[in-house]
Image: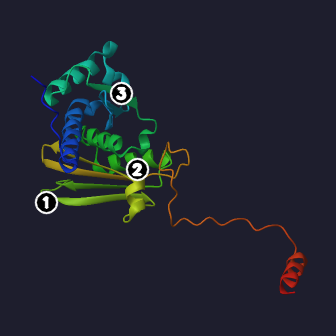
Amino acid sequence: MAAAPPKRISKKKKFVADGLFEAELNAFVLRNLAEDGYAGIEVRRNPQRVEVIIRATRTKSVLGDKGRRIRELTSVVQKRFGFEEGAIELYAERVAFRGLSAQAQAESLRYKLIGGLPVRRACYGVIRAAMEAEAKGIEIIVSGKLRSQRAKSMKFRDGYMLKSGQPALQYTDRATRHVLLKQGVLGLQVHIMLPWDPAGKKGPKNPVPDVVKVLEPKDDSHQERRGRFQQDQE
């Protein structure tokens, strides 16, 4: 009996399925690795297997003793999403610039607030860390029952921040977290404006369109410029 042909799936359904997979995987990894400075995942697909790169500030904790923890996570993900043996691999990658990662800073702020640090002091500590890492700007929004029974929102800003257009999508790193405290739930939003980096390590390679670079004038005398002008007129 001939084997059944592989079931074809439309591009629309494929994009939706890939998005659901990444969202659920991100939520699962966040629950397990929040204390290890989790800063996001990257899913790379090739014909042989799916590679998931986990970015974190403490990669040794993510890997575990002799790689035991990463193997356990791989096994759980493999069973949950129905992958075959060896069809999915998890890797750990260290975040090179922690101060420029919105997810890492949001997790840091979350644990500071859980530890009882005042909101203002915790937020200014995160702002200082981001600006010292050469961020263009940072904005933190904390909302919920901060001091009294009435909920309110506090904003902390520093530097330059784009709010609209394509550059805002390219240059702004965003993260959202929720803090469960005794008085209620606090919502945290961290937006970091990344710097322009031609190498593409700290930020995007493409420069911001509205930045104008003024070049130094050439060192030539007024008489030479006047002579060239007269020649052009002739």
Residue found at the very far front of the displayed protein: 1
**Residue closer to the observer: 112 or 95:** 95
Residue neighbourhood size for the residue with mark 2, other residues' Cα within 10 Å, grouped as few (<14), some (14–19), many (≥20): many
Question: As displayed, is residue 155 above or below residue 38?
Answer: below
Residue at the spot of label 1: 150
User: Which color scheme is applied?
Assistant: rainbow
Residue displayed at 23% across by 33% down: 29
Secondary element at tag 2? helix
Q: Quadrant of the N terminus?
A: top left
The CA span between labels 2 and 1 is 26 Å
Q: Residue furthest bottom?
A: 234
For mark 3, what is the residue?
92
- Asked if labels 3 and 1 touch by Cβ distance under 8 angstroms, the answer is no
Residue at the extreme left: 1
Pinpoint residue 126: horizontal percent, then vertical percent. 38, 46
Position of the C terminus by quadrant? bottom right
Report how far apart the C-alphas of labels 3 and 2 lie in the structure: 27 Å
Residue 87, disc: none
Q: Identity of the amino acid at label 2? A: Ile
* Circle nearer the N terminus (2, 1): 2
Three-letter code, disc 1: Arg
Against 11, is 47 above or below? above
The answer to which image quadrant residue 116 occupies is top left
**Whether label 2 touches label 1, CB < 8 Å:** no
Image position of 1 (left or right of 93): left
Distance from disc 1 to disc 3, alpha carbons, whole Å, reads: 42 Å
Which residue is under mark 2?
127
| 215 left or right, relative to 21 | right
Q: Left or right: where does residue 2 sit relative to residue 55?
A: left
